[in-house]
């Protein structure tokens, strides 16, 4: 991507799909010391942690790309509440979402709108390290804006994949 951006003189864009569910991560944000701890596992908090990780990754990647002077942006976004099978393991919530969802949740094309906007729209040119919702910049949680946490996650990910 870096080579293509340099040779084509066109901005590259990386879009991480997250969720406003990142606000429901574990209290400490990322449980680095309990990453595989089944005893303290909670599916809602784990989902929040994974979505928080998407935001932190985009933020740290944006910082690194800017530092390198590469014309590539990295952003994250919340697509909105969409009628999907995401709640299939939470039977009551799944029934509720499928029953009422068609009246109050976004359909798939509506849910894709922010992703397309961040990936393609000229108004987003040069914008990097941001969180979007409903095709607008939005404010991520305090954990989602924590640059030190983003760096720690980056380093932790490298160590887990033996890249350090």
Image (tube, rainbow, N blue to C red):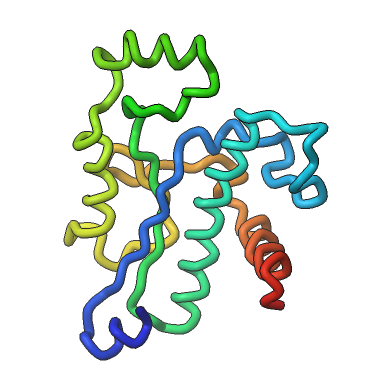
Instruction: Give above or below for 97 relative to 162.
Output: above
User: Image point 67% across, 76% down: which residue?
Assistant: 163
Q: Is residue 62 left or right of residue 113?
A: right
Q: What residue sits 35% from the left and 73% below the top? A: 72
In the displayed structure, would residue 131 be above or below residue 163?
A: above
Q: Which residue is painted at 30% across and 88% down in the image? A: 6
The image shows residue 19 at horizontal and vertical percentages of 45, 39
Q: Quadrant of residue 128?
A: bottom left
Please state the horizontal and vertical placement of residue 2, each as a whole percent of the image.
37, 82
Spot occupied by residue 111 in the image (x, y as percentages of width and height): 27, 36
Q: Residue at x 33, y 78 (%)?
A: 71
Image location (x, y in percent) of residue 1: 35, 79
Q: Answer with the quarter of the image where residue 7 lies.
A: bottom left
84 versus 70 height, above or below: above
Depth check: give the residue in front, 21 or 96: 96
Q: Is residue 106 left or right of residue 131?
A: left
> In which image quadrant can residue 138 be found?
top left
> Where the C terminus falls, by quadrant?
bottom right
**Count of numbered tags:** 0
Q: Is residue 120 left or right of residue 4?
A: left
């Amino acid at each position: 991507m870096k080579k293509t951006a340099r040779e084509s003189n066109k901005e590259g864009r990386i879009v991480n799909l997250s969720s406003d569910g990142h606000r429901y991560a574990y209290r400490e944000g990322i449980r680095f010391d309990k990453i595989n701890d089944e005893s303290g596992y909670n599916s809602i908090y784990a989902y929040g942690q994974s979505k928080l990780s998407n935001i932190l990754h985009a933020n740290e990647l944006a910082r690194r790309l800017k530092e390198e002077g590469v014309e590539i942006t990295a952003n994250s976004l919340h697509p909105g509440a969409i009628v999907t099978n995401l709640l299939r393991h939470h039977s009551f919530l799944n029934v509720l979402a499928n029953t009422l969802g068609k009246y109050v949740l976004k359909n798939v094309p509506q849910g894709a709108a922010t992703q397309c906007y961040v990936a393609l729209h000229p108004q987003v040119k040069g914008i990097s390290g941001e969180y979007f919702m409903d095709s607008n910049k939005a404010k991520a949680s305090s954990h989602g804006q924590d640059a030190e946490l983003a760096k720690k996650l980056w380093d932790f990910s490298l160590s887990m994949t033996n890249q350090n």
